[in-house]
Amino acid sequence: MDKFVVRKRKNESDSSQNNKKTKSQSSAEITEQKSLNVIFLVNEQLEWREIRRENLNCDYCVLFGKKNADRILEECERCLSYNEGQLAKVQIYGKWHDIPRKQVAHGDEGLAYSFSNNTVPARPWTPFLSAIRDVISQKTGYNFNFVLINRYKDGQDHMGEHRDDEKDLVFGHPIASLSLGQSRDFLFKHADARGKNATRSIETVKILLEHGSLLMMKHPTNVFWYHSLPQRKRLMNVRINMTFRMMVVK
DNA sequence: TCGAATAACTAAG
DNA sequence: TCTTAGTTATTCG
């Protein structure tokens, strides 16, 4: 009873791995959810912005128009739940803290997400999340077996500088980051330009992640650049971010 | 242009 | 992937 069905266009190839376009794409894929009568319709002409620096390789577009992004966000708020208790904590320098946001992972059976002395098992895919995953796969040509969802209730919630843990991820596979709700600044900082031991001066790259947008973080960005979502105390609204990944199956 | 608010950065734990 | 505190830089009315 897969409520969300991805309907492919008849003339479209199924071999999504061969379809690594980054320029404008004209076809409109439609995903529909019959019981709620919700249709996921992506923007027809995707205007990809290519963000390039030394060893930084990202593509950005607004995938869902406002109306559809609004509906997806509403559905997230209606049906997602988040980790609590020990699964919502992180250990740093021996001290446990609550993470300053809400978080949950969904993915293929057996996968888990590890960070700072914590391991969070993936919950099963829901039809809603599978449908979003499949739309992104169709538009980008990459498959994903895991999604980490972070909910930032307002501008106080944030995430510190980090790189995504390489040993859990299939090397070289991009991460797809879907943003919903409050626009937030997203910063990339080069590893050689961090902290007081910085060996080089490299400008921080700031990207505004808008409602309905998709940021593709491609190899080798995550090897060389740290990323963060800094506090923006004047912002009052919720942002939900989904990062679709390909994890190593152990 | 000032001054307050707040963001950025550093250090330590 | 944290917090807090102290300092400096930036933003904004």
Image: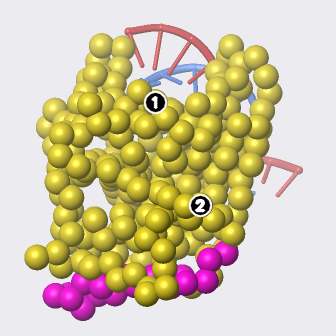
Chain colours: A yellow, B red, C blue
Q: Do labels 2 and 1 share a chain?
A: yes
Q: In this view, does A76 lie above or below A110?
A: below
Give amino acid for label 2. Lys
Q: Is residue A185 above or below residue A237?
A: above
**Which residue is the site of mark 1?**
A166
- Which residues lie in the magenta part? A24-43
Q: Mark 2 lies on which chain?
A: A
- Find residue A39 and report its horizontal and vertical position in percent: 34, 87
> 10 Å neighbourhood of mark 2: few (<14), some, or many (≥20)?
few
- Find residue A95 and report its horizontal and vertical position in percent: 29, 18
- Front residue of A35/A159: it is A35
Q: Which residue is drawn at 71% across and 58% down?
A: A50
**Which residue is the site of mark 2?**
A20
Disc 1 element = helix
Query: Quadrant location of the C terminus of chain A?
Result: top left
A27 in the magenta segment: yes
Q: Can residue A189 be seen in this view?
A: yes
Query: Quadrant location of the N terminus of chain A?
Result: bottom left
Q: Is residue A185 above or below residue A166?
A: below
Q: Mark 1 lies on which chain?
A: A
- Front residue of A228/A145: it is A145
Q: Tell me which numbered mark, 2 or 1, is placed earlier along the sequence.
A: 2
What separation in Å lies between label 2 and label 1 (alpha carbons)? Answer: 22 Å
Q: Quadrant of residue A94?
A: top left
- Find residue A153 and report its horizontal and vertical position in percent: 35, 57
Nearer to us of marks 2 and 1 is 2
Disc 2 element = loop
Tell me the chief SS of the magenta region.
loop
